[in-house]
Image (cartoon, rainbow, N blue to C red):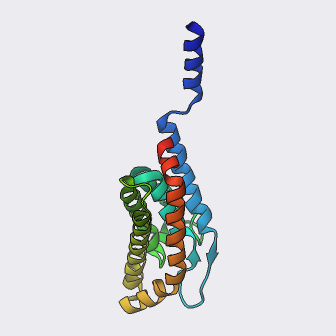
Amino acid sequence: MTQHIETASTAALAAPSRRTRTVVAIALGAALVTASAQVAIPLPFTPVPITLQPLAVLIVGGLLGPAAGCAALVAYLAMGMAGLPVFAAGGSAERLVGPTGGYLLSYPVVAAMVGAMMRGAPTSVVRAVLASALGMVVIHVGGAAQLAIITGSTAGAVQYGIMPFLTGDLLKIGFAAAVILLAGPKVRSAL
């Protein structure tokens, strides 16, 4: 009996706590979005590059849930504001008031929204696609809103901040939904 208790105690000490697992997941989520920002293709006719950030934001929210997903994106923005080169064009607080700032500022909201939408039905294909699509809409609304403020043109913001990205974003929505469905239940149960 004593040996069984010692073995159980040793196993409990070796297993990371729920809080530790959540902190690690938040850090990994922020790292995923940072890595996705480094895949950036500048377009000559718009100040907004093509990046994999929206895809990563959808995945992080869908996998980590609303609180941890939002926390990962808040951590990501904090790192960028502190000057770490986590954004597509480096890092600084100025990026949040520039042409891509609206996209960046929408990320914590989107991660929380996608995470909340997936909470009740982690294996629903329709819900995963809908959550990813609505998340992408919110990203574009945030981005276009800031572009419209900066340029003074709503039509220009739509033309240069949304239209060039639609085809790629449809692919990102599908891929995000697939990842959320395949990995989501396992990741969420580990948190």
Quadrant containing the N terminus is: top right
Q: Is residue 92 shown above or below 168?
A: above
Question: Residue, x 50% and y 59% (percent of image)?
Answer: 180
Question: Residue, x 48% and y 61% (percent of image)?
Answer: 77
Name the side, left or right, on which 118 lies relative to 179: left
On the image, the x and y values in percent for residue 172 come to 53, 72
**Between 144 and 66, the one nearer to me in the picture:** 66
On the image, the x and y values in percent for residue 166 come to 49, 83
Name the side, left or right, on which 83 lies relative to 148: right
**Between 152 and 138, the one nearer to me in the picture:** 138
Question: Residue, x 56% and y 91% (percent of image)?
Answer: 45
Question: Residue, x 48% and y 36% (percent of image)?
Answer: 18
**Between 164 and 149, the one nearer to me in the picture:** 164
Q: Quadrant of residue 38?
A: bottom right
On the image, the x and y values in percent for residue 30 come to 54, 56
Q: Is residue 17 visible?
A: yes
